[in-house]
Every structure is written in structure tokens, then in C-alpha cells.
């Protein structure tokens, strides 16, 4: 069974991409879900593929479902269309659009065809990741729930003052007079 490898570029930065390996008999719905999973996006929004040429011009639409909009030609439905049915050349391209309000666009390009599949992989799957994926709903990276859990566990709140770590003049810091009084008390103890 032929395995197709698609490189999925984020439109805003081509250095950020994911390589998806998928069986030629799987559907565009499978490819859609694999792309979302590889970029860590949820599956809550509208989506569509467009068959494309080398200039990334949009052609025939392969949609998640028929949406309430004017189509020049009725769209194909992702779940009903096998990927091999839309491959017209060795470097076939598609434009993938997700979340019509946020307008996430990805360029999907066939980069390799393998004659056999790997017994170690479950298809479709992401076989290569380059760059940090964009955040679907805002900030991403270190500022997420894991950091919040660490802050809570270790009390790393930015406004938490620790002994000896407050800046001079901040709440919780000591004045020069208080420091002098403390050092005098400490000298008397010895």
C-alpha cells in the first residue's frame, strides 16, 4: 500500500512545518485530523481543503461539510474522498483552511511517495516537526497550564517576596534604618 508524505507549512512562516505520512486510501478527513493534531489545534471549527497548483491558487474545494455559503461548484466532502482520488501529479498541492474566523491557512504539498508502509507506525501520523507551532488561541510555549502548576507548586508568583530578594523601596523591603537596627542587635548578640 502506498504511503504519501505531505509537508504542511504554516502560511505565515514556512520554516514551521509538519510532515504527515498517510495511506493513499485514507480520506481527507484523516489528513485534516492529522494536521490538527500535529499543530496541537482542537477539532472544533470549520475546515476545508482546496486543490491547488504550483502557484497556490485555490481550485476544487474539499470541505469538512457543506457550509452555508455560495459555492461556484458543490464541494466534495472530506469523509467521502480518498486522498489518491485528488492526486493529479507527483508534487500535488492543497491549501488547507481551518477556523474561518481566525483564518488559519496551511500549504500542503506532496513531497514523497513510499511503496510500503512501516509496521511501527499508525497512519496517519506526524513523522517530522520543524519549528514551534503557532498557538491556536493566544500565547503558547512556557506560558501555559504547566507553568501555572509550577508557580502554584513552588510559589513562583512574580509578586511573591522572599527574604533577601525584595528590591529596595518595594513593599516588604526594609529601610536603611531598619537594617542598621537589625545589624546593631546582631552585633550585641555576639
Image (cartoon, rainbow, N blue to C red):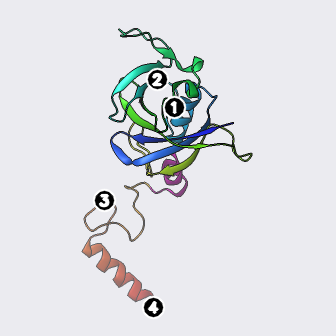
**Boundaries of the magenta span:** 145-156
Is residue 155 one of those drawn in magenta?
A: yes
Kindly report the distance in space between the C-alpha atoms of the residues bearing marks 3 and 4.
Answer: 30 Å
Q: Which is more N-terminal, label 1 or label 4?
A: 1
67 versus 138 height, above or below: above
Task: Look at discs 3 and 4 and give the one toward the viewer.
Answer: 3
* Secondary structure of the residue carrying numbered label 4: loop
Task: Look at discs 3 and 2 and give the one toward the viewer.
Answer: 2
**Residue 69 falls left or right of residue 2:** left
Q: Tell me the quarter of the picture where residue 163 sits.
A: bottom left
Q: Which residue is mark 4?
A: 190
Identify the image quadrant of the N terminus. top right
Task: Check contact, mark 2 vs mark 1: CB within 8 A.
Answer: yes
Is residue 151 one of those drawn in magenta?
A: yes
Q: Which residue is mark 1?
A: 42
- Mark 3 neighbour density, 10 Å: few (under 14) some (14–19) many (20 or more): few
Q: Nearer the viewer, residue 176 or 188?
A: 176
Q: Which residue is mark 2?
A: 45
Task: Check contact, mark 4 vs mark 1: CB within 8 A.
Answer: no
Amino acid at each position: 500500500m502506498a504511503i504519501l508524505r505531505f509537508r504542511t507549512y504554516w502560511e505565515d512562516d514556512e520554516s514551521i512545518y509538519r510532515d504527515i505520512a498517510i495511506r493513499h486510501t485514507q480520506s481527507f478527513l484523516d489528513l485534516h485530523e492529522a494536521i490538527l493534531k500535529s499543530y496541537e489545534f482542537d477539532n472544533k471549527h470549520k475546515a476545508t481543503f482546496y486543490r491547488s497548483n504550483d502557484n497556490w491558487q485555490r481550485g476544487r474545494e474539499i470541505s469538512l461539510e457543506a457550509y452555508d455559503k455560495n459555492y461556484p461548484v458543490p464541494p466534495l466532502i472530506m469523509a467521502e474522498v480518498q486522498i489518491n482520488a485528488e492526486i493529479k501529479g507527483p508534487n500535488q498541492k492543497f491549501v488547507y483552511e481551518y477556523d474561518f474566523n481566525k483564518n488559519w491557512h496551511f500549504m500542503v504539498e506532496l513531497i514523497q511517495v513510499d511503496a510500503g508502509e512501516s509496521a511501527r507506525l499508525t497512519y496517519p501520523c506526524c513523522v517530522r516537526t520543524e519549528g514551534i507551532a503557532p498557538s491556536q488561541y493566544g500565547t503558547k510555549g512556557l506560558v501555559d497550564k504547566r507553568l501555572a502548576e509550577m508557580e502554584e507548586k513552588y510559589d513562583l508568583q512574580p509578586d511573591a517576596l522572599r527574604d533577601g530578594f525584595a528590591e529596595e523601596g518595594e513593599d516588604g523591603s526594609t529601610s536603611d534604618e531598619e537594617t542598621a537596627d537589625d545589624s546593631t542587635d546582631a552585633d550585641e548578640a555576639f
